[in-house]
Amino acid sequence: MESALAKQIYDKLLSVYGPQKCFLEHMTPFQLLVATILSAQCTDKRVNMVTRDLFKRWPDAEAFANCGREELEQAIFTCGFYRAKADHILKAAKAIVEQFHGELPDTMEGLLKLPGVGRKTANVVLGDALDKPGFPVDTHVRRLSALIGLSGSSDPEVIESDICAVMPPETWSQFSHLLIVHGRTRCPANRPDCPGCELAKLCRHTKADKNAGKKASAAKKSSTSKKTVKAPVKKTAKNATKKTVAKNAASPARAAKKTTSKSGRKT
């Protein structure tokens, strides 16, 4: 991918949507970690509804490390996959308390040591809570990266590597947010608004559609301009025989007609 193309896309999205911030509500880096774990296969809106009460009951890692599993599962039930998410949150909280003295790690390597924390979650925390470079690749970022032409891979780690290789670190987190908001508003998966898209002139998918349309139109025009030429009938022995028989059959009738006209009666 060309650096110039990525920069053009970033600048265009920034001019359309303006600077974006994290959609998940939080007061501390640890709260963002919990909210991001809850956001898997769940909307940010739902997560924010749940965490408003959740963080009042358990505001930090120590509080979560000491809370009961069943109580936590019930509190996060509406976020879906509540058992697995409760397990990740409890184990991560205990690891922070026991291994990191209650402080959330502030590096990718440290965050990945926490149970249930992958690169996406770590990048969210780095970019939005710790003010460090991080490029989270969620479903919107992965889908748009392929459509627009930012990456030729569907692997989140490869996409992250491709984009981070050509964009300045200070733009990573913001670029991810811009792609997400564009994916939610202008380019949703089932009904993308390609004709009204601000990235139409830059997007590989839109260009491919236009080129395919032009080729189809040209092919149709070419086929309609060709005139159908009727092939001449070749004279064959079979056709000649048919004509001779028809001529002979008509001869007696013509002879009778001539005789009648001369004598006034048929012979």
Image (tube, rainbow, N blue to C red):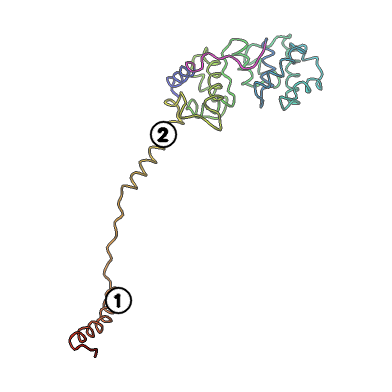
Q: Is residue 32 above or below residue 241?
A: above
User: Looking at the magenta stretch, what is its main secondary structure?
Assistant: loop
Q: Does the magenta stretch include residue 131?
A: no
Tag shown at residue 242: 1
- Name the residue located 19 percent from the left edge and 89 percent from the top edge: 263
The residue carrying pointer 1 sits among few (fewer than 14), some (14 to 19) or many (20 or more) residues within 10 Å by Cα, namely few
Where does the magenta region start and end? 14-26
- Identified by mark 1, the residue type is Lys
* Helix, strand or loop for disc 2: helix
Mark toward the start of the polypeptide (1 vs 2): 2
The quarter of the rendered structure image containing the C terminus is bottom left
Mark 1 to mark 2: distance in Å? Answer: 57 Å
The residue carrying pointer 2 sits among few (fewer than 14), some (14 to 19) or many (20 or more) residues within 10 Å by Cα, namely few
Residue position for label 2 = 210
The percent coordinates of residue 125 (x first, y second) are: 63, 15
- Identified by mark 2, the residue type is Lys
Question: Which residue, as the protein is rendered here, is positioned at the far bottom?
Answer: 267
The quarter of the rendered structure image containing the N terminus is top left
The percent coordinates of residue 170 (x first, y second) are: 52, 12
Relative to the observer, which residue lies in front, 265 or 182? 265
- Name the residue located 73 percent from the left edge and 9 percent from the top edge: 102
- Name the residue located 69 percent from the left edge and 13 percent from the top edge: 31
Query: Is 73 displayed left or right of 209 in the figure?
Result: right
Question: Which residue, as the protein is rendered here, is positioned at the far front?
Answer: 264
Tag shown at residue 125: none
Q: Quadrant of residue 209?
A: top left
Q: In this view, does 59 lie above or below 223?
A: above
* Helix, strand or loop for disc 1: helix
